[in-house]
Image: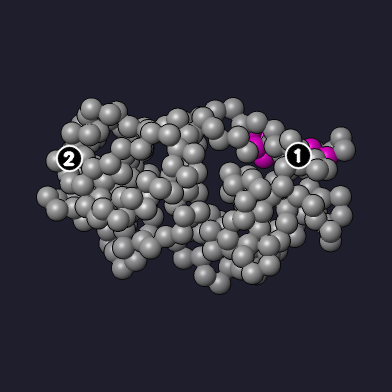
Amino acid sequence: MDHSFLYTKKIILVDDEPDLLKLVSNILTDDGFENIVVAASVKEGIAVSRNEKPDLAILDVMLPDGDGFLLMEQMRSFTDIPIIFLTAKDEAVDKLAGLCLGADDYIVKPFLPQELLLHIYAVLRRCYKEDAPLLKLDNCAIDFSRAEVSRGGEVIPLTAKEYTLLEALARNEGKIVTVDALCEALWGDNPFGYENSLNAHVRRIREKIETDPSKPVSLITIKGLGYKLNTRK
């Protein structure tokens, strides 16, 4: 899927751990994001946000001069950009608090690069709309704006889970998306135990998009890793 319009969005990262700032910045720039700015405290985050006017903020909960919740509250006085929190695995209360305060999403540390990107793509697409293009596969086309598959003159509707799964794969077209990342995209923060359900959704999608579901050419299994979606240029 063409998501080049997302790459122009400016993202601010606020965290007091230099290694994490570097890691997240590298993940984003390697994927194609062009405008990344960083800050290491609440005070710096406010200053950078006012000057740079980012389109998305990724905030750590724990900061040296306060916390991400305080930073979000202050940012809300001059911007309504979407906000994602970074939380540690045992900070369930913080995750709930962030969402209750109006955060758009949260990401649990440690995270896989693909998990981070899937969360960011999802938030950006919700907040910055662009007409969804047709995604052409070997035997069909997927219309994400209508959640439909067009194949040989037939229109086949997608279920919500099928749509979410295909969208996650399309954002990474031609690249492997891990089973864990796909399960998290479908079932949230606790994806463990859903692998059989994921396999069942993959089988049903193949029945809709493949000429021969038993010999897929578009939705490919990468044994031991996950799946990838091959598109037709």
Q: Do we see residue 100 in this rendering? A: no
> How far apart are the alpha carbons under marks 1 and 2?
45 Å
In the rendered image, the quadrant that contains the N terminus is top right
Image-quadrant location for residue 42 = top left
Q: What number is the disc on residue 44?
A: 2
Residue 158 vertical placement versus 4 (above, below) = below
x 61%, y 68%: residue:
195
Q: What number is the disc on residue 167?
A: none
Q: Position of residue 99 (x, y in %)?
A: 33, 50
- The residue that label 1 is drawn on is 232
Q: Do we see residue 88 in this rendering? A: yes
Q: Position of residue 89 (x, y in %)?
A: 34, 66
**Closer to the camera in the image, 167 or 35:** 35
**Closer to the camera in the image, 86 or 154:** 86
Span shown in magenta: 144-151
What type is the residue that disc 2 sits on? Glu
